[in-house]
Image (cartoon, rainbow, N blue to C red):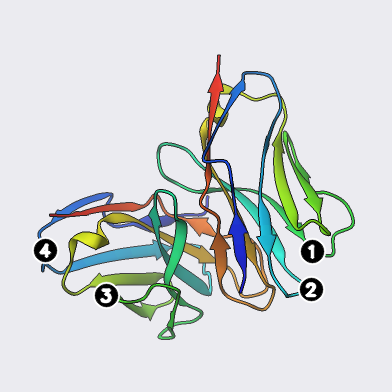
Amino acid sequence: AQKITQTQPGMFVQEKEAVTLDCTYDTSDPSYGLFWYKQPSSGEMIFLIYQGSYDQQNATEGRYSLNFQKARKSANLVISASQLGDSAMYFCAMRAPGGFKTIFGAGTRLFVKA
Amino acid sequence: DVKVTQSSRYLVKRTGEKVFLECVQDMDHENMFWYRQDPGLGLRLIYFSYDVKMKEKGDIPEGYSVSREKKERFSLILESTSTNQTSMYLCASRMGQQTGELFFGEGSRLTVL
């Protein structure tokens, strides 16, 4: 069965510093996709970044990058130059291509300090 | 701008009452989903629909049903609410099976007393 694990319930980071949010996954499928979503206090989930299991390079989107280590089954999110607006819940998620379900981790709440 | 709209942001109901949560998307997406979000558990899939009038159970369908009579609309029904259904309910849509990310509504926070 597929599973996503986020072991950090909460994280603090100083404004302008980088922060890494951990995500490990478990699947027996050779082909899958990994996602990160952000959920501000307003409640709406926002897609941040995607990594396919066969992608050769780590995905990047602006200040977000995904540190993909396939052998270790980890897909950590790196946020560079943190901003106060980055304070939110962050969810790691996975879907097998050809499948309908996207499964989510428990989430990490990030607090950015001024 | 793409949009997923949920009918109610906040609801308070008494045990045994019926609840109808509606979700509408304006992106012509094939797939639609209902998740519930609880602290420490993340998002768990209740039901999904891959096409009009088609529905499939997710991981926690007990106590819920769904309806998708039109492509843009996916409704979640709680026939007789219980206190353990107090939660945040999130609707999402996706273009199709092979394509990427989910687009979410703002959520409906249900409290059952």
Which residue is under mark 3? Answer: B63
- Label 1: chain? A
Residue extending farthest to the bottom is: B53
Whether the residues at callouts 1 and 3 have beta carbons within 8 Å, the answer is no
Looking at the picture, which amino acid does disc 2 mark?
Pro
Q: Position of residue A58 (x, y in %)?
A: 83, 49
Residue at the spot 36% in from the left edge and 76% down from the top edge: B61
Q: Earlier in the sequence, mark 1 or mark 2?
A: 2
Q: Residue at x 65, y 25 (%)?
A: A82
Mark pair 4, 2: CA separation? 45 Å
Q: Mark 3 or 4 closer to N-term?
A: 4
Query: Which chain is mark 3 on?
Result: B
Task: Give the amino acid at mark 4.
Answer: Thr
Mark 1 element type: loop
Q: CA distance from mark 1 to mark 3?
A: 35 Å
Q: Residues within 10 Å of mark 2 (few under 14, many from 20)?
A: few
Q: Do circles 2 and 3 both sit on a common chain?
A: no
> Taking A41 as reference, is A105 above or below it?
below
The kind of residue tagged 3 is Gly
Mark 4 lies on residue = B15
Q: Which mark is residue A30?
A: 2
Q: Which residue is mark 1?
A: A53
* Label 1 environment density (alpha carbons within 10 Å; few <14, some 14–19, many ≥20): some
Mark 1 touching mark 2, by CB under 8 A?
yes
